[in-house]
Amino acid sequence: MIGLAPLALVAGFFVTALLYAAVGFGGGSTYAALLVLSGLDYRLLPLLALACNIVVVAGSTVRFARAQITPWRGALLMTALAAPAALLGGLTPIAQNTFMLLLGASLLLTGITMLLPVELGAEAQPTRMARHMPLVAAPLGYLAGLVGIGGGIFLAPLLHLTRWRDARAIAATASLFILVNSAFGLVGQMLKHGPGLFGQAIHGGLPLLLAVAVGGQIGSLLAVRFLPQRLIRWLTAALVIWVGARLLLGL
């Protein structure tokens, strides 16, 4: 049971939360992948990963809102379209091998997109695709609910590539997107597996929840005061690609 999680797993969750929080994400994709590598029952993975997501991004969402950074009209539209799809994804039965394949492939793709250059200073001139970003919200929400993540790690690279808004507004949007999708996806997972399995995941995962709470706070502090965003993105991408490759090679 993960209540007796080895120190390496707790450390992995701490580092993941630190890196992801520094770029405005929750880390759910890598939490789930690390739990797969630990040998945990795959039915528990989305429950614990989504709970960790909520812990990490709740504070970020509030901070962005208080600082009046969140572009509410666009952020709420995409989140409203994605949330019901995340619930549906959480309710959808999925075989273990299919789950691992989707998670590993999505991690690899996400890691690669995080390495793509972003044109700084071009935020005032969105591409033609920027206005169509709400169209991708529902598919991303469904995929997020299916594999037990918040989906912001899929959405944010697309928003950057299309120069939808400036970097801080995109981070604020991703945080809200992750928070709401994680909540809806968690409800779907609970309805699918029952509250008993959720209680088992949370009870056994308390050390991991504490690790991401501390790591998330430190990551936010480092992003604001110390580490350059480009370095943080590269470190996060390297972690995501390594974990995704490990998952796919293990199939």
Image (cartoon, helix red, strand yellow):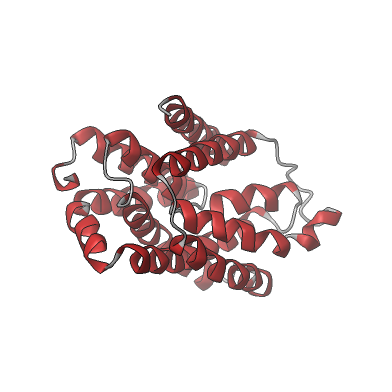
Residue at the (19%, 45%) spot, across then down: 2
Q: Nearer the viewer, residue 166 or 58?
A: 58
The quadrant holding residue 108 is top right
Q: Is residue 93 above or below residue 100?
A: below
Determine the residue positioned at 51% across, 53% down. 24
Give coordinates of residue 44: x percent, y percent: 30, 52
Figure disc tally: 0
Vertical position of residue 64 compared to residue 158: above or below: below
Camera sees residue 28? yes
Left or right placement of residue 125 versus residue 112 in this view: right
Q: Residue 210: x and y, percent?
A: 24, 53
The residue that appears at 56% across and 62% down in the rendered structure is: 172
* Residue furthest left as drawn: 4
Along the viewing direction, whichever of 106 and 129 lies nearer the viewer: 106
**Position of residue 88 measured from the top left corner of the image (x, y, whole percent):** 51, 66
Residue 27 visible to an observer of this rendering:
no
- In the rendered image, the quadrant that contains the N terminus is top left
Q: Residue at x 32, y 62 (%)?
A: 193
Task: Give the quadrant of the C terminus.
Answer: top left
Give the side of residue 207 with respect to residue 230, left or right: left
**In-front residue for pair 159/34:** 34
Q: Outermost residue, right direction? A: 128
